[in-house]
Amino acid sequence: MLKNNKKIDKKTFLIVKSVILKIDLYSLLKLGLPEDEFDPEIKSIVAQLPNCKSPLDIAHTIARIFSSSFGEKFEPDEYLEYGQEIFNLLRDNGCKIGN
């Protein structure tokens, strides 16, 4: 488990991280910031996965967390492709999705 107040499944975290890093919001990774730059947002996304029952739910979660973290409005449709990828990877790797 990762160090955090709540226990987060490491496999789930790494799957979500692999997809979120593809987004590279604001090109921060291209600018040389470390790969753990988005770890707080990834942990928040993982913590919300029990409430997600579809790729669209995951896209809404990504947009909501990014909006909260970065102080601007992000739309779920911008992240539907990533929500689908996370959903498929979690399902295909035997990770729990939704309650």
Image (cartoon, rainbow, N blue to C red):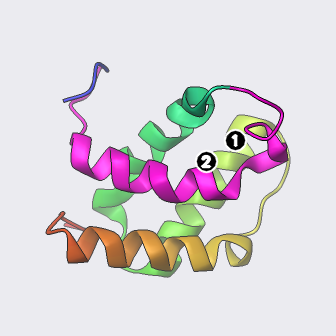
Residue 16 in the image: x percent, y percent?
42, 54
Say what amino acid the circle numbered 2 marks. Ile
Which residue is more in the foreground, 87 or 5?
87
Return the residue at label 2: 65
Would you identify the image quadrant in which residue 29 lies? top right
CA gap, disc 2 and disc 1:
5 Å
Residue 5 in the image: x percent, y percent?
29, 20
Magenta stretch holds residue 32: yes
In this picture, residue 27 sits left or right of residue 49: right
Which residue is more in the foreground, 18 or 43?
18
Crowd around label 1: few <14 · some 14–19 · many ≥20 (10 Å): few
Q: Tell me the residue at 61%/47% (across/down).
A: 65
Q: Is residue 19 in view?
A: yes
Residue 26 in the image: x percent, y percent?
84, 45
Q: Are marks 2 and 1 in contact (CB under 8 Å)?
A: yes
For residue 67, above or below residue 86: above
Residue 4 in the image: x percent, y percent?
31, 21
Q: Find the residue positioned furthest to the left.
A: 94
Q: Tell me the residue at 33%/71% (across/down).
A: 89
For residue 84, above or below residue 93: below
Q: Tell me the residue at 57%/70% (across/down).
A: 59
* Magenta segment: 5-33
Magenta stretch holds residue 45: no
Say what amino acid the circle numbered 1 marks. Ser
For residue 27, above or below residue 53: above
In this picture, residue 98 sits left or right of residue 23: left
Would you identify the image quadrant in which residue 41 lies? top right
Return the residue at label 1: 68
